[in-house]
Amino acid sequence: MAHKAQVAMTEVENERNPSYLTPNHPMLFVRSCSFAAPTMTPSVSPCLRGRFRRSIVAIIYDSIVKKIRVRLGKNSYDVMIANGLLSRAGREINRLLPGKASRVFVVTSPTVRRHWGEALERSLTKARMNYQVLEMNDGEPAKRLDTVERLAEQLVAAQADRKSLVVALGGGVVGDCAGFLAAIFLRGIPVIQVPTTLLAQVDASIGGKTGVNLSAGKNLIGAFHQPRAVLVDPQVLSTLPAREFRAGLFESLKCGVIRDRALFDFMVRKVRPILARDRRALERVISDSIVVKAAVVSADEKESDLRRILNFGHTIGHALEAATGYSEFLHGEAVGWGMAAAAAIAGSSGFCSPETTMQITNAIEAYGPLPPVRSASGEIVGRLSADKKTVAGAVHFVLPIKIGKVTIASDVPPDVIRQSVEQIRTHA
Amino acid sequence: MAHKAQVAMTEVENERNPSYLTPNHPMLFVRSCSFAAPTMTPSVSPCLRGRFRRSIVAIIYDSIVKKIRVRLGKNSYDVMIANGLLSRAGREINRLLPGKASRVFVVTSPTVRRHWGEALERSLTKARMNYQVLEMNDGEPAKRLDTVERLAEQLVAAQADRKSLVVALGGGVVGDCAGFLAAIFLRGIPVIQVPTTLLAQVDASIGGKTGVNLSAGKNLIGAFHQPRAVLVDPQVLSTLPAREFRAGLFESLKCGVIRDRALFDFMVRKVRPILARDRRALERVISDSIVVKAAVVSADEKESDLRRILNFGHTIGHALEAATGYSEFLHGEAVGWGMAAAAAIAGSSGFCSPETTMQITNAIEAYGPLPPVRSASGEIVGRLSADKKTVAGAVHFVLPIKIGKVTIASDVPPDVIRQSVEQIRTHA
């Protein structure tokens, strides 16, 4: 009973996960205000009395499992990570609201809304917030200026003002569009990101990059607009299709390679529990990835130098996406191939040892399979110079020196690039 | 001959203003490096020899007549004002370029290009700059996201990169669109504003406000994106239609009312020379207005408080524009009516004396006539709450206390507002 004093039974919500429940087995949610929550279930059970005697017990952390600060002066904010966070998002959002009279506009996609809209809406209602839901389509083709314009017209129709708040509930496309909407509506209103894909949780939602595509390429239009907060609830990943889930893991792998050897090693060791979405393994992967991203962004908001290391795997990755019309690869998958190519370049140019190249390649494979690369090498290489990171024709590569450390090279010979692309093509 | 030593004849350009010239009367441009230039012609003439003996002499200031600093930390920049500045814009732009390999994209309208495109292009060529001209339509209807998107696609096609520079050559619409294009292209590239209307010179080009309209209202989409410099050449106003020229003067009058009594008095005293575009009178109006705008913007970049005083006349002005579908009034004209309405509100609410109201009204009339206000009062008042400056339903008015000093009121009774609108309607 050591933990008994830490437990406060404050709330019973039988409407959650109704399929588990019968009148004889109500579900009891126990809120805990300490990190000890996961170990508490055995301590709680003997305390149950009356109609809760036969309850199924679920622990809701009342604490934030992890709160990671993105330090950007007056634009600083927290990334909060907690299982079940979505169901108390209303409270967190309320705390962060720009003003009493503020209104909340949730931008989401029909799919995400079906799975998680109700949970968020319920928590907003509980926090007595004046909100409205705006829908946009998911998927790259929707990530265009006309989507943003349509949403903006809806904001005006609903009389949104400068103190209104946008809440982006969705994956990368929703986050990028809704973030950009917030960046340019009335020259900028606040946004809170609530990412619902692994890729968005560990990467896209953090750092303030927002924007849309042009017909000529991805993310060519955009703005830096830091969110007021990022609310990460790993539970929402339960409805994520397997392919999307795996694609997101490549961004985590990237974080390991560029700055966190321990994360990389953990991911190599724990492939099965991670792919099985084991809660604890997943929480570690998510929070460690976010720590890397937050640290890099904090040190360099606008990608002048350090932040470019986050583009590991993205040089060839973007080219691959462009060459295939953004239809064959999920972004994370293209980054997977891009990391393999970058590792090959680094190995063949002597930036890293053959062992490091091999380690990276093996890790990528372990989280595969990736869809095969079918584009011609020339087609892929040709796309490199159209990338927005290209300055005056020079293509930059982020190359590993060892696991946890990378460098930036802008003078990789065309032959070496072509060879690396050839390698991922034949590998596929 | 006191000035003789200050004069350096460095350049002869016979291609300028060819209608004045004959082989026997070549035009001689004398560059001067001091502010004394305008008084120098008599000193220069006796020095002329050889084939220049019979020359028509024109002085080109080699100095910047006035350089006004907009102080915004690392986003600081100069507004340079000089007659003939356009013909050496290339040199100034070169000096400000972000990098050796940079390319310049001039965004302009067909009309402005016809008048001033060649002068700018020639100076860019002379400065050996790699440039390209992109055209967009003038006029409010063109100020939309799809115009910006089209320009962005052209930038990509021309392989613009992060070190490319946008030069906005035109009035407010071109400046706002091209500035917004620069704000969001690759998440932001530099822009230099070269305003060609009076309104753009004294107001729109300074302060970093960029953006476009939605179908629901003006400037509802946008970004703060400070230019690297603003190049103001009063000479380009020579081709400006009279109505547009007068419309711009209302923004100068506004600067006088909100912060510069001397400018206001000067404009009241010098109505005729100013309307006749007398060079010296105009230069003073332009540079004094810019001093006001630059000072306010420097003190408050993002319109949290002080910057709102620049909206004097804009509350009713915007409503008037919206009520007439942006087709009956030029922006400056609507601001003229808006100032008259605000002066009426201030007078009837006791914020200022009846004399102050009268002075302002008279000055507006002196620069009139303004097109009559035909919309119903209710229609105009109804538009107030849709303004983007409205926060949580409260409409803010900038009201004069005396000439040179204003205050902000957010609790003007609806009756008083309606009465002021009624007044400008019957006045018309």
Image (cartoon, coloured by chain):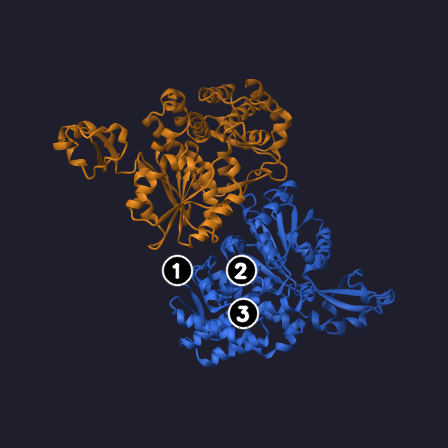
Chain colours: A orange, B blue
Say which mark, if any, is on residue B70.
Answer: 2
At mark 2, the secondary structure is strand
Query: Mark 3 is on which residue type?
Result: Arg
Camera-nearest residue between B70 and A152: A152
Q: Residue at x 57, y 78 (%)?
A: B268
The disc, 3 or 2, on the residue closer to the chain's N-terminal end is: 2
Q: Estimate the x, y position of residue A229 in percent, counting from the top left.
A: 38, 43
> How would you rate the neighbour count of disc 1 (Cα within 10 Å): few for under 14, some for 14-19, many for 20 or more?
some
Q: Give the labeled residue for mark 1.
A: B393
Q: In front: mark 2 or mark 1?
A: 1
Q: Residue at x 35, y 54 (%)?
A: A99
> How would you rate the neighbour count of disc 3 (Cα within 10 Å): few for under 14, some for 14-19, many for 20 or more?
some
Q: Is residue B33 visible?
A: no
| Residue B280 horizontal side relative to residue B421, left or right | right
Q: Estimate the x, y position of residue B93 in percent, counting from the top left.
A: 65, 53
- Chain ID, mark 3: B
Q: Residue at x 36, y 53 (%)?
A: A102
Q: Estimate the x, y position of residue B291 in percent, counting from the top left.
A: 55, 66
Q: Give the labeled residue for mark 3.
A: B374
Say which mark, if any, is on residue B336.
Answer: none
